[in-house]
Amino acid sequence: MLRIENLHVSFDGNKILNGVDLEVPVGKVHAIMGPNGSGKSTLANTIAGHKGYDVTSGTVTYKDLDLLALDPSERAAEGVFLGFQYPVEIPGISNMNFLRTALNSIRRYRGEEEMSAAEFLGLLREKAAALGISNDMLKRAVNVGFSGGERKRNEMLQMAVLDPQFAVLDETDSGLDIDALRIVARGINAFHGPEKGLLLITHYKRLLSYVEPDVIHVLIDGRIARSGDKELAEELEEAGYAAFA
Amino acid sequence: MAANAEAKEQVDKATSEYKYGFTSDIESEFAPKGLNEDIVRFISAKKNDPDWLLEWRLKAFRGWQEMVDPTWAKIRYPEIDFQDAYYYAAPKKMNGPKSLDEVDPEILRTYEKLGIPIREQEVLAGIEGAPKVAVDAVFDSVSVATTFKKELKRAGVLFMSISEAVQEHPDLVRKYLGSVVPARDNFFAALNAAVFSDGTFVYVPKNTRCPMELSTYFRINAANTGQFERTLIIVDEGSYVSYLEGCTAPMRDENQLHAAVVELVAFDNAEIKYSTIQNWYPGDKNGKGGIYNFVTKRGICAGKNSKISWTQVETGSAITWKYPSCILKGDGSSGAFYSVAITNNYQQADTGTKMIHIGKNTKSRIISKGISAGHGQNTYRGLVRMLGKAEGARNYTQCDSLLLSDTCGAHTIPYIEVANPTAQVEHEATTSKISEDQLFYCMTRGLGQEDAVALIVNGFCRDVMQHLPMEFAVEAQKLLGISLEGSVG
């Protein structure tokens, strides 16, 4: 579903990714673990199309599409989603309005009819309830005054409503207490299915006890140093990243 | 006298041809170029003015001749040759396109985005012969206008062109015309007083809540009002009106001057909400053409606990020079100014307000949102003056600027004068750039770059937009997006 080959990426003139190779088949969950500064967020931002990340060589293919040739909104409309580590605030725009604008923008791109206000509200309420998101939170401006946990849950809500096919979740588990982590994990599991692909980026194996990955990759210095099954997470937990460098 | 006779002949000819619509010789709609007392007399004669009004115009004109254009605003433009312009009829009609095929496709695209029907587009684009024919299309049907007139009449509300009001309610007009903005108030107001050819008049009698939002949108298209319009709104004790002024008709001529005057009078416990969406032609990407918009708007809260609020969304014009103001004379009266001003490409805006606190416990609130893009220059200029007797007066001012490019400018120039020690004045100002992270975030959710900019800017303007009547808010939101197209690269 997503195939990354020999990806080299610089940010602010510094080489961050040094030849990443990665393939996530449809229906699978892959996790990327790695120390701070290893390039995890760079990989996530590159997949989503952030302008600041300069792809110097390599390819990213998503369902036969050259993903790098598309702008971020086109990638989103094709079904790629990025759950942010630090979701940004958009003052003055209600969460509800934001999501509806986004959803209809994607539907227009796909040549589908825009969703009516009533139909949208039904969908939103259903998805919000599953994530324990209050009506009040839907009416507040996007992420403005949200706690860390609320922001992450809000990312899950966006994923649920926009219903992408491939999601990259960048440290969605960081900064969450155990209850919030469970809710977020439930959101991820509800999203996952045989038609979907998932790339989880995480520091800790904590999340992986709620969401079981098919493959774990260890990213060190902008390269996949090792790949393996969930045993690898245990190994990492004991030995630390230094053992993989 | 030769010029006089020539002008008279042309005016007479135009008058007779008006009755038969716009299909006949267009050029004859003009008085000769230039401005002198004869032209003022002609306009006055054409409008069938009573003598007092002619005298008032002449007084204004003589005052104007001794004035010079104000230069204190942060706007740059070549000197205007006031003798090289027409002051009667609608010069924009002269080179009007014959059909929509001749209209700049960009303008049509804008109309489409605003969801304006094709017949209405013809009117807005100034297609020759379109206005009169298209009125029905604009208003859907004549019955709409009729129903609406009946309903107003039942409520006792007078709503008509100022020309009609001069004829039908001369006492009211004479009493209040120039009572808030005197004939010689400033250079552009004096020019307007001398040559104004039409405008709107509203009178709401005591203890009456005007049953509907009044809008020039209904009237201007039908009346084809000129560029020196004058608006006078009087709301009597205990009454309320909400008035909407939509200038969504971009004119295509080069650097046309638009100098309007608006006067509002609110008596005890009266409330006036005045909303404007100004989208005159802003000029092209390189700053060529566009309207010079020099407007004087002022309201007086004459009575106790009266309220006036100005809400404006200024997206058009090459130059905007306007300071809708409130004179808070009645004790406990309050004034508000909510403004969004956008300058893109080479547009320049110098806009703000004046809140003059005279009465006790008067309150004013100023929320200004300036958005600059391209090479646009955007200045907030506002005066808050607390006079000696303004015991317990309060003002709150918030000025926020948003920058969308490295070549634009935002300036905030507050003037605060306090002569009463019990008065309180608060001023907050921020300047920020649209953030790449916000844009990226919106785009990863499927919004195209321009839609993302529009969304963020709409959020930035929310505190102002929420004061617009619903039917205008939607149009205004779309306009913000359209005005900023191509501004982030």
Image: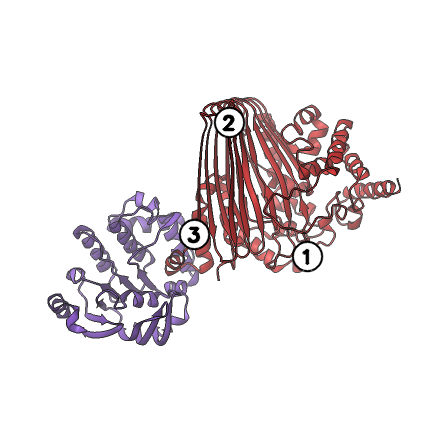
How packed mark 3 is, by other alpha carbons closer than 10 Å (few <14, some 14-19, many 20 or more), is many
Q: Residue at x 16, y 60 (%)?
A: A206
Q: Which chain is red?
A: B
Location of residue B473 in the rendering, given as x and y in whole percent from the top left corner: 49, 44
Viewer-side label of 2, 3: 2
Question: Does label 1 or label 2 sit earlier along the sequence?
Answer: 1
| Left/right of residue B192 with respect to residue A91 in the rendered view | right
Residue pointed to by mark 1: B99
For label 2, the SS is loop
| Left/right of residue A120 with respect to residue B489 in the rendered view | left
Residue B18 found in image quarter = top right
Location of residue B88 in the rendering, given as x and y in whole percent from the top left corner: 75, 42
Residue pointed to by mark 3: B456
The answer to whether residue B36 is seen in the rendering is: yes
Q: CA distance from mark 3 to mark 1?
A: 37 Å
B433 over B181 or under it: above or below:
below
**Relative to the observer, which residue lies in front, B399 or B168?**
B399
Location of residue B236 in the rendering, given as x and y in whole percent from the top left corner: 57, 23
Q: CA distance from mark 2 to mark 3?
A: 40 Å
Location of residue B436 in the rendering, given as x and y in whole percent from the top left corner: 40, 58
Question: Does label 2 or label 3 sit earlier along the sequence?
Answer: 2
Residue pointed to by mark 2: B419
Q: Residue furthest right?
A: B2
| Chain letter for the residue marked with disc 2 in the picture | B
Q: Residue at x 34, y 58 (%)?
A: A162
Question: Does label 3 or label 1 sit earlier along the sequence?
Answer: 1
